[in-house]
């Protein structure tokens, strides 16, 4: 790789707080849009799959297709951010997201909806990888906590607003679930315009050759594994010829990807980055957190609406405690990390709180009162708020500036992959468990409909209604019990991460210093 700009041209100065906030305004809008569009659909899913004549497996697929596309493309977005204009890439990811949202809102059937979710996922992959890369380029790790807390607040507000807005739209006859997708389009256009006006980053132009073969093999291998984890247990048995074929194909593709990545001068995922102990442990922890968090919480809205019989709007309100916990913990932890310069304690505390909250949530049933449920969810939010962002911070602080994009995207990639595997695999477990419980209560003939079709509880007679609600409550509580040991493994990985002092220079400043050192020039 050859730099065509001189090292002196790469030198940058520290940005003031006002300059940083102006530069982050459009980025925050983009993050707000992506989170809002992702969460606004959660309470609409039961209505969407009913209107489109879908079943429980499609309920899972609407979530996992976006996660799959996002997961598969995160490494490529992260690599491109080390080579090309971060600003242009963020805007391009928003374009993907807007197009996907527009098509989703116009979907005449399940097939088009799932295709549009793939396009949304590609855009979300860009935002996932690039948002934290852009922040790291402008802000030093020591100061990153306060701004990360602000992003946590944006995340929390969007996550709160999403289910609420989605519930209101579904419950409003003249709007309907399609507006859950249309809503984000104008905000996305505004975000693109704001980024054009406010985001200005120094660019070191390089002559590069992107490893598209490696990127293709990574995406194909990961997608194959994720498709297997989604279909296994529903379309075919876990121990079957299909399982052997898909897993083998996925592993072969990933082995080929590793061989290609080892030989190319510009790998999508630099394999030597895993020689860094912090990056490796943070990656393992992020994978496990993704499985536990996404897999454990994505079915809560279904629990609220089916097991507890709540409306979509009320289901949105019931998610507030978890978001409040996340908002408070991420904001406070970020401010204290900036003040004290220490982060390991917050990381460990979050990793301890998460499995404890899962154990508590495994006790829920149809009679759990709102206050108790709210406390359990708030505790989970606190743990997530202290854990997720600080795993990224730990990795970013411990790699050279020229690997910031790769390190950030690797963490995001494995967290997203864990989430996709968790949602798909645990969705299959939930559907199978619901079918088994209903078969025990109503006879074998009920197993297929109970575990496959998502019931409209408003049409069920009282005796059947109680059985269906108990089945979904029991299955959901068991999901939380399953993810508890996974969260404990994440805690073990976190305990072995070594705390290192936070850098006081931004990623752009560190990159300029590295370029000057490589050129044999004194750093300014």
Image (tube, rainbow, N blue to C red):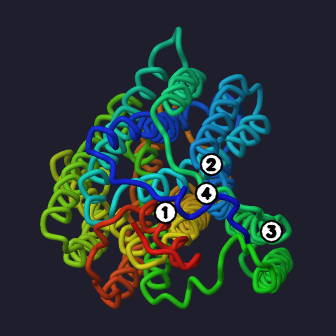
Q: Secondary structure at mark 4?
A: loop
Identify the residue under disc 2.
85
Identify the residue under disc 3.
211
Q: Are marks 1 and 2 in contact (CB under 8 Å)?
A: no
Q: Secondary structure at mark 3?
A: loop
Q: Earlier in the sequence, mark 3 or mark 2?
A: 2
Q: Quick check: 189 above or below 14?
A: above
Q: Are marks 3 and 4 in contact (CB under 8 Å)?
A: no
For mark 1, does the 10 Å Cα neighbourhood hold few (<14), some (14 to 19), or many (20 or more) residues? many
Of all residues shown, which one is farthest toward the top?
174
Identify the residue under disc 1.
295
Q: Quick check: 164 above or below 261?
A: above
Question: Which disc is residue 204 wearing?
Answer: 4
- Where residue 224 appears, as percent x and y from the top left, is 78, 68
Q: Earlier in the sequence, mark 3 or mark 4?
A: 4
Viewer-nearest residue: 190 or 299: 190
């Amino acid at each position: 790789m050859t730099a065509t700009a001189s090292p002196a041209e790469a030198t940058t100065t520290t940005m003031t707080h006002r300059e940083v906030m102006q530069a982050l305004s459009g980025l925050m809008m983009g993050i707000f849009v992506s989170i809002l569009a992702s969460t606004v659909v959660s309470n609409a899913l039961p209505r969407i799959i009913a209107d489109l004549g879908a079943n429980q497996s499609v309920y899972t697929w609407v979530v996992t297709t976006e996660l799959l596309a996002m997961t598969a493309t995160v490494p490529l977005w992260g690599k491109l951010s080390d080579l090309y204009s971060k600003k242009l890439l963020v805007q391009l990811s928003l374009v993907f997201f807007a197009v996907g949202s527009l098509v989703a809102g116009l979907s005449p059937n399940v097939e088009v909806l799932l295709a549009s979710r793939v396009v949304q996922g590609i855009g979300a992959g860009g935002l996932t990888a690039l948002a934290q890369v852009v922040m790291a380029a402008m802000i030093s790790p020591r100061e990153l906590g306060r701004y990360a807390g602000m992003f946590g607040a944006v995340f929390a507000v969007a996550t709160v607003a999403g289910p609420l807005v989605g519930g209101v739209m579904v419950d409003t006859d003249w709007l309907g679930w399609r507006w859950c997708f249309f809503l984000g389009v104008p905000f996305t256009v505004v975000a693109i315009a704001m980024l054009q006006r406010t985001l200005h980053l120094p660019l070191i132009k390089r002559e590069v050759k992107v490893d598209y073969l490696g990127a293709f093999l990574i995406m194909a291998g990961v997608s194959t594994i994720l498709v297997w984890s989604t279909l296994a247990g529903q379309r075919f048995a876990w121990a079957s010829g299909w399982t052997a074929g898909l897993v083998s194909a996925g592993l072969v593709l990933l082995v080929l990807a590793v061989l290609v990545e080892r030989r190319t001068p510009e790998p999508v995922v630099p394999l030597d980055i895993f020689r860094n102990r912090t990056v490796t442990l943070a990656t393992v922890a992020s994978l496990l957190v993704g499985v536990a968090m996404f897999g454990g919480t994505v079915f809560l809205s279904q629990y609220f609406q089916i097991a507890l019989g709540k409306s979509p709007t009320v289901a949105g309100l019931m998610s507030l405690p978890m978001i409040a916990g996340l908002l408070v913990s991420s904001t406070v932890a970020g401010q204290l990390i900036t003040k004290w310069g220490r982060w390991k304690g917050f990381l460990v505390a979050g990793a301890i709180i998460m499995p404890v909250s899962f154990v508590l949530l495994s006790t829920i049933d149809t009679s759990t009162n709102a206050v108790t449920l709210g406390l359990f969810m708030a505790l989970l939010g606190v743990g997530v708020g202290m854990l997720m962002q600080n795993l990224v911070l730990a990795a970013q602080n411990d790699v050279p500036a020229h690997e910031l994009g790769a390190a950030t995207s690797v963490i995001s990639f494995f967290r997203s992959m864990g989430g996709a595997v968790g949602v798909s695999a645990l969705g299959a477990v939930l559907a199978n468990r619901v079918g088994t419980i209903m078969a025990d209560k109503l006879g074998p003939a009920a197993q297929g409909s109970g575990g496959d079709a998502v019931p409209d509880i408003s049409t069920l007679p009282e005796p059947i209604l109680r059985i269906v609600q108990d089945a979904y409550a029991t299955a959901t509580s068991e999901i939380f019990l399953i993810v508890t040991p996974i969260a404990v493994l994440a805690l073990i990985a976190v305990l072995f991460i070594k705390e290192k002092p936070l850098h006081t220079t931004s990623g752009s400043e560190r990159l300029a210093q590295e370029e000057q050192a490589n050129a044999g020039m004194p750093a300014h």
